Amino acid sequence: MSPKSGTPKKNLMLFSGRAHRELAEEVAKHLDVTITPQTAHTFANGELFVRFEESVRGTDAFVIQSHTNPINEWVMEQLIMVDALKRASAKRITVVVPFYPYARQDKKHKGREPISARLIADLFKTAGADRIMTVDLHTAQIQGFFDGPVDHLFAQNILAEHIKRTYGDADIAVVSPDSGRVRLAEKWAQQLGDRPIAFIHKTRDPDKPNQAVANRVVGQVEGKLCVLVDDMIDTGGTIVKATDALLTEGAADVVIASTHGILSDPATERLSNCKAREVIVTNSLPIPEEKRFPRLTVLSIAPLLGEAIQQVFEDGSVTSLFDGHA
């Protein structure tokens, strides 16, 4: 290119897997772009096929996929999309995973176990991803598993603003469902105005997934509105037992706030029957109508993802979205 013609114009293109098209459409609207059309289908034997209908050569490609059930199918679809973009000469490929798959398998608890969260990072790198963007990782160390930039976004601002608008005048205590989430509770407590914190002391059998025994409450919760915070709700067992423990200890009320609403069965039944005043999650994962219930509030992370994608595209600062706390 001659000096007179200047630098080529950068081109942002957004691509969406089939797991949660609604979120991708919201992000596209925020960015004022359209999702790149593609052909995608599943063969009779379960193999996946993806082909993009427009040229992607030299583009800054953002591939969004929400890893809900069946999670392995959607992981594979996103890997195939990245591979297709790499082979079609996309200039930079950013994998957008609002919910990082296999995040709970981030270390070995016993011998002969996998570290599957690292494997996922390796798979995306091998497929051709240059960058990963994700929201509220189960553990921050997962950022180091990917050999490249990782944008770790926080949905806490979205959830906390809803709490402040709805319950700002209440006597609030922030509660962690276990000792491992105390640091998260501390961040919440600061954002909600230096509120006191508490946590549930519980035991968990590593040989029995999705099963926990809530024990005693550590901290003062009597007469307070307890905001029970966690990064994800899967079957709902832990969070419901924690709610019961807080109410037994004299809490005035309980509000549950979590970024990722996995809501595997029987979560909807448990949560709809529990005594929490409200359950707040984001749309990082699709929540179909059959999993919704009257006290469930779903907040959108599309503006957060859209703003972060814009910053990455313009080589700006993602950290600035969180006032320096990223």
Image: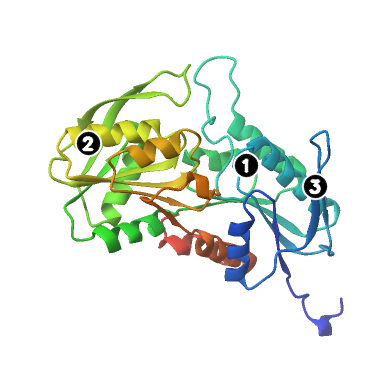
Q: Along the line of sight, which residue is nearer the eye, 324 or 206? A: 206
Circle 3 is placed at which residue position? Answer: 41
What amino acid is at disc 3?
A: His
Q: Along the line of sight, which residue is nearer the eye, 313 or 176? A: 176
Q: Quadrant of residue 39?
A: bottom right
Q: Please, what secondary structure does the residue beneath circle 1 have?
A: loop
Circle 2 is placed at which residue position? Answer: 246
Distance between mark 2 and mark 1 Cα atoms:
38 Å
Numbered label attached to residue 146 = 1
What amino acid is at disc 1?
A: Phe
Q: Nearer the viewer, mark 2 or mark 1?
A: 2
Q: Is the residue 217 above or below the residue 132 in the image? A: above
Categorize mark 2 by other alpha carbons within 10 Å: few (<14), some (14-19), many (20+): many
Task: For residue 318, say whether it is visible.
Answer: yes
Q: Residue at x 58, y 19 (%)?
A: 113
Q: Disc 2 or 1, which lies upstream in sequence?
A: 1
Categorize mark 3 by other alpha carbons within 10 Å: few (<14), some (14-19), many (20+): some
Q: Is the residue 317 above or below the residue 78 in the image? A: below
Quadrant containing the C terminus is: bottom left
Q: Disc 1 or 3, which lies upstream in sequence?
A: 3
Query: Residue 38: horizontal and vertical position, in percent?
Result: 79, 58
Q: Please, what secondary structure does the residue beneath circle 2 have?
A: helix
Whether residue 258 sits left or right of residue 113 in the image: it is: left
Q: Disc 3 or 2, which lies upstream in sequence?
A: 3
